């Protein structure tokens, strides 16, 4: 096994688990699933991307999970939707005021998670971490497009 692979995979797994734990703690009073939290956060943090397909594309969550989460959030009154006037196949999602306390809690959890990742890094380590993360993200984005047709 490549010397970088094992620690990278271990870090990715731990990163995911700790992030999910932060989100779960934040949304415990709201009884949101991780996928519902991901949909709400994506919509709140990316206002120019407001369709379920945007969530699928940019968060790499399956269509079925996004669909299930959106239906649940609509039923709970956390989201509303509006058909696109120019493209009737497209539906724009909107976060409703009742969801804002949960969204704020999730955003605070994201901020705390970000501090956790970076608080013990020197400025040089932080710069290297950011540069390496961007490089990996670009590489993985290109690679993931190879598999979109499957």
Image (tube, rainbow, N blue to C red):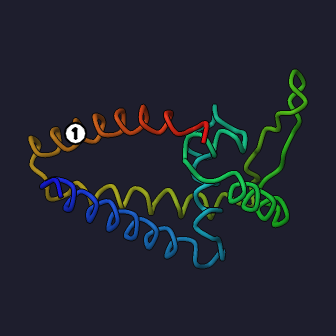
The quadrant of the rendering that contains the C terminus is top right
Drawn side of residue 17 relative to residue 27, left or right: left
Drawn side of residue 139 relative to residue 125, left or right: right
User: What residue would you read off at disc 1?
Assistant: 132
Residue 53 placed where, x, y %?
70, 40
Element carrying mark 1: helix
User: Does residue 92 lie above or below 32 as drawn?
Assistant: above
Q: Residues within 10 Å of mark 1 (few under 14, many from 20)?
A: few
How many numbered discs sit on the rendered protein? 1
Residue 43 placed where, x, y %?
63, 45
What residue lies at 39% left-to-right and 56% top-to-bottom? 111
What residue lies at 52% left-to-right and 39% top-to-bottom? 147
What residue lies at 90% left-to-right and 30% top-to-bottom? 88
User: Does residue 120 lie above or below 94 as drawn?
Assistant: below
Which quarter of the picture shows residue 49? top right
Which quarter of the picture shows residue 77? bottom right
User: Does residue 106 lie above or below 63 as drawn?
Assistant: below
| In-front residue for pair 23/51 | 51
What residue lies at 76% left-to-right and 52% top-to-bottom? 96
Residue 63 placed where, x, y %?
70, 51
Drawn side of residue 95 relative to residue 21, left or right: right
The quadrant of the rendering that contains the N terminus is bottom left
| In-front residue for pair 23/144 | 144
Residue 117 placed where, x, y %?
26, 58
Drawn side of residue 32 relative to residue 81, left or right: left
- Residue furthest top in the image: 86
């Amino acid at each position: 096994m490549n010397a970088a692979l094992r620690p990278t995979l271990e870090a990715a797994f731990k990163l995911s688990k700790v992030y999910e734990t932060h989100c779960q703690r934040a949304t415990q009073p709201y009884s949101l699933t991780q996928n519902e939290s991901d949909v709400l956060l994506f919509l709140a943090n990316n206002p120019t991307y407001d369709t379920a397909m945007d969530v699928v594309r940019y968060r790499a969550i399956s269509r079925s999970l996004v669909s299930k989460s959106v239906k649940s959030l609509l039923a709970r009154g956390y989201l509303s939707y509006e058909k696109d006037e120019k493209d009737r196949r497209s539906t724009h999602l909107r976060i409703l005021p009742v969801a804002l306390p949960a969204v704020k809690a999730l955003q605070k959890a994201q901020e705390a998670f970000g501090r956790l990742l970076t608080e013990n890094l020197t400025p040089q380590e932080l710069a290297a971490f950011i540069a390496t993360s961007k490089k990996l993200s670009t590489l993985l984005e290109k690679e993931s497009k190879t598999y979109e047709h499957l």
